[in-house]
Image (tube, rainbow, N blue to C red):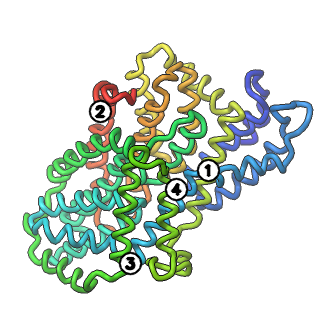
Amino acid sequence: MITIILLPNPGDLPVMGQRALAILAFAVILWMTEAVSYPVSAAMIIGLITLLLGLAPDMANTDVLLGTKGALKMALGGFSNSAVALVAAALFLAAAMQATNLHQRLALYILSKVGVKTGAIVFGSILVSIILAFFVPSATARAGAVVPILLGMVAAFGLPHNSRLGALLVITAVQSVSIWNIGIKTGAAQNMVALGFIEEELGVSVAWSSWFLYAAPWSIIMSVVLYFVMIKLIKPETKVVEGGKELILGKLKELGPMKSSEIRLVVVSLALLFLWSTEEIVHPLDTTTVTIIAIAILLSPKIGVFDWKTVEKLIPWGTIIVFAVGIALGTILLETKGAQWLSDKVFGAMGLEHMPLLATIALLSLFNILIHLGFASATSLSSALIPIFIALTTTIAIDANSVGFVLIQQFVVSFGFLLPVSAPQNMLAYGTGSFTVKDFLKSGVALTVIGYLLILLFSATYWKWIGLL
């Protein structure tokens, strides 16, 4: 970072832009190495923004310094972004699911209906991940609901948790979670990062239904691919899990009949899904507004499902801070011209402006996949890359297709298929010891290659037909 600051300042880059790029480099190193926790990195980034930009010449008047007060306002600007409010509300909703165990009941119910054949359970674990993605806007919470149930089924058959059956079911579940992080707007926090930047810089709001129209067909096809990839690559010890259904029915019995709090949560969740999916169609309320209203209802006495003391224990507050600081850093990169300068120098040198749009998407998607190998958080990756991709739309002059171009790269940001460290839900599953890195990599390579080719196919056909590109 110090090296970047001390370099001669390019004439086409403001001092604030140079220092913003130095802070980005520092942030990327922290995020890739995990030298400190993500919330700690957020505090460091706020401090650096305040000091380095505060002591830099103001872009509006280079004769005076911006001042630490003005820089602090920029550093904390992400907290006022509506996307941060949506992520916070989504975490509250996930906490409500955990507090009532509704997500576990739903997973158990679905698995109880699919049968005891191995192929049917694989299908069931994919189906559970899909359905939970509509109602639980947290990838880690979805994985946390399904994985213990699947391992319980393995144990019921008398097999160790690290058996081939255990590896098959657990890897299938978390890979399906990653696939549907892409298919549903509210499925993952990194989607909110991208949408926050798109709305702020490009002035376009992407409705829940529009995102679903763009991405769900890709996720549906990938879910089918996942089924056959897993059945082919990992051969379980048995084709029938005897005792599995009894175990699930027993766990359902332990949960007892649906509590009134669960029923209220079902009603609120279904209403929320309806309002999300009909945004800009039958009502003018945006996704963030309806989600916050739903959380207010869930926290209300008598009609709610949990209280504030319960929420305090279940919400990962550091995630909200990291998310807001990531948005602030990305916004600063755009406002100080740092993102545009980096885009011009890096991607401009590659001659992307002379390439067909499909070739540009192919090259950038490959770059996106490779750089993800160094990031354990797709949210951090979105914070680092999406501002640069937005700036790139100006470099290669694709203004008419800019939103679609950035959205496609956001889809690729969620490719957490390759390694256990590629996504938090992968690490949660890996922590059970049910599979090896080699097992995960085998399925991950196949899913990444097929997913990448499907991105290119959709870019050349479907996304053109519906007007995304």
Amino acid carrying label 1: it is: Asn
Query: Disc 4 and disc 2: Cα gap in Å?
Result: 36 Å
Label 4 CA crowd tier, 10 Å (few <14, some 14–19, many 20+): some
Residue at (41% x, 33% y) in the render: 366
x then y, percent, for residue 202: 56, 33
Q: Secondary structure at mark 3?
A: helix
- Residue at the (27%, 63%) spot, across then down: 170
Tag 2 residue: 453
- Marks 1/3: CA–CA distance: 30 Å
Pointer 2 local density, CA inside 10 Å: few below 14, some 14–19, many at least 20: few
At x 29%, y 54%, the residue is 176
Instruction: Give the mark nearer the N terminus: 2 vs 3.
Output: 3
Q: Which residue is mark 4?
A: 289
Total numbered labels: 4
Which residue corresponds to mark 1? Answer: 81
- Mark 2 falls on what kind of element? helix
